[in-house]
Amino acid sequence: DPSDPANYFYLANIYEQNGDYDKAEAQFLKAKEMKPNESTVYTTLAAFYDRQGEFEKTINALNERAQHEPSNPEAHHVISTYYWNEAYKNFKLSEADKKKYIQAGIDESDKALAIKDDYFEALTYKNLLLRLMANLETNPARQQALLKQADQLKSKAEELQKAKLAATATAAPKKS
């Protein structure tokens, strides 16, 4: 089925494993062309770019997904996780770029929370991003304010997660 993105993903994977990254990218883009409203084409393309070390292309693919899913908080949350990962793990980044990425991640978490205010995963990552920002802060008062805000978000996320688990446990059928 030429309209099934899975076929293009499979072919792209073969090309990627053989080191032919241009042909792999072409297949991922063909999948996007076939199903432009399907989120997996964007997340799969973003993962490919991430493996290639193409951070800006990764973010662009994820932003395209978010544009196609404006009411899906997870689309923005995923973008924030990529920003956190880049700021946390890329030691080659300048401090200015780290701050820029951290702020972009916080902004994406805020977008997710604007859609769904009890989205504990977004609260968790916003907490982590604030802690990264605090690590870069030279003003002790500002650093403590960031850590306090992070702690509040962490507590709220934990409460929401516990409530979700409790609701799931009570909704599960009881075994006899």
Image (cartoon, rainbow, N blue to C red):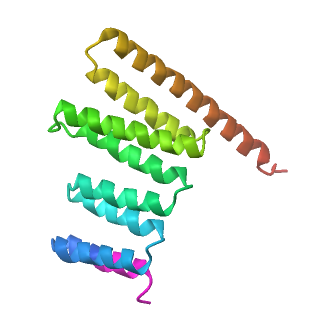
In this picture, residue 88 sits left or right of residue 38? left
In the rendered image, residue 169, in percent from the top left (x then y), is placed at 73, 43
Nearest the camera: 86 or 94?
94
How many badges with numbers are in the image? 0
Q: In which quarter of the image is the N terminus?
A: bottom left
Residue drawn at 38 percent across, 74 percent down: 32
In the picture shown, does residue 82 fall above or below 153? Answer: below
In this picture, residue 136 sits left or right of residue 169? left
Q: Main secondary structure of the magenta part?
A: helix
In this picture, residue 18 sits left or right of residue 68? left
Nearest the camera: 58 or 160?
58
Residue drawn at 32 percent across, 58 percent down: 60
Residue drawn at 39 percent across, 61 percent down: 64
In the picture shown, does residue 31 fall above or below 149? Answer: below
Quadrant assignment, res 67: bottom left
Magenta residues (range): 1-11
Quadrant assignment, res 159: top right
Residue drawn at 74 percent across, 41 percent down: 167
In the rendered image, residue 21, in percent from the top left (x then y), is placed at 18, 71
In the picture shown, does residue 48 fall above or below 117? Answer: below
Quadrant assignment, res 162: top right
Residue furthest to the right: 176
Nearest the camera: 3 or 104?
104
In the rendered image, residue 135, in percent from the top left (x then y), is placed at 29, 22
In the picture shown, does residue 121 fall above or below 173? Answer: above
In the rendered image, residue 45, in percent from the top left (x then y), is placed at 33, 65
